[in-house]
Amino acid sequence: MKRLIHFILPLMLLAVVMPAVGQERIVFTPQWTAQAQFAGYYVAQEKGFYREAGIDVEIVHPSITQTALNRMRKGESQATTLQLCQAMEIIDGGIPLVNILQTSMNNAMVIVSRRQMDPLTQRGARVGTWSAGFGQLAICMSIKDSLNYNWIPSASNLNLFVAGAIDATLAMSYNEYYQLKQTGLPVGEEYVYRFCDHGYNVQEDGVYMQRDYYLAHKEEAKKFAAASRRGWEWAAEHPEETLEIVMKYVKANHIATNPVLQRLMLTEILRLQVDRESGKREFRLRRDMVETSSRLMVEMKMLKHAVTYEQLTDEKKD
């Protein structure tokens, strides 16, 4: 009997840690470190939604030396999250991508003024931005609205802002905006410019694959997208349990944050997923927002050519 147990136990352990035969392996790399911005994918992993869909998913976060896009270019990751404007720049640069799932339906970018002034009155102001990118829409707005901001890229733009070294800073409504509030600085709405309220409501996060990989693995891509959407829908219905899952990933990746900030982030991320017009979580790329962002970026010479909705999706033009 003991010999039988010694034989069976290792097999049971292997069954737990090894993917089922025939499951396609997908390495998914979010564009940033572990946080509630990616809660739906953590939920899909922890609740077994990916496994139930027949795919073996590994979530690998980027590092300073290995960005999500670099991992995908090298074939080390098969899927990543990108903001719409980022994806358009990448496609314009010669790397075809396909959006397989759109989670953001609204723009989260804001400008917060350090001088207790309306950002629209600060022409030529020194405005902090992320050295890692993500500021394409803000640059378009600065030029188009004749604000001519002096952009100060930094890995720690909040530190510059808090120290008073810059006049204003870019922030995400679900992230840096709440971090600033936690510092105790006066961040009244009259000192905050929200892009979504001024004609720049362009979608942000979506899940992308390189087109060649997508065309060779369409079924797996669809399964990954469906299971990820299921994760986000579950997160919206169970925010407190989702927060526990997020904190598990945060701790495993040694991220300096706190549950209060992550709860605020999760609430705001879920709010941004609801389309303003329909009032629903649609999980779709909107053609009108693609056209708006493409037009803006071409006009501001950030794209050499217009990027179309068809270039971003698997849909054919009517």
Image (cartoon, grey):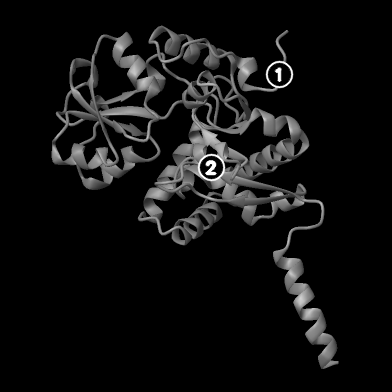
Residue type indicated by callout 1? Glu
Does residue 154 appear anywhere in the picture? yes
Toward which corner of the image does residue 177 lie, by quadrant?
Answer: top left
* Above or below, 91 relative to 71: above
Q: Position of residue 284 (x, y in %)?
A: 62, 26
Label 2 Cα crowd, 10 Å radius (few <14 / some 14-19 / many 20+): some
Residue 313 image point, x, y percent: 65, 22
Disc 2 secondary structure class: helix
Q: Which residue is mark 2?
A: 71
Other-residue count near label 1 (Cα within 10 Å), few / some / many at <14 / 14–19 / ≥20: few
Q: Residue at x 53, y 30 (%)?
A: 104
Q: Which residue is mark 1?
A: 315
| Labels 1, 2: front one | 2
Residue at left offset 52%, top offset 18%: 92
Is 92 drawn above or below residue 217 in the view shown?
A: above
Element under disc 1: loop
Left or right of residue 242, residue 54 in this image: right
Measured as percent of width and height from the top left, residue 69 is found at: 51, 37
Q: Is residue 28 left or right of residue 122?
A: right
Residue projecting furthest to the bottom:
2
Residue 114 disc label: none
Q: Position of residue 271 (x, y in %)?
A: 49, 34
Q: CA distance from mark 1 to mark 2?
A: 26 Å
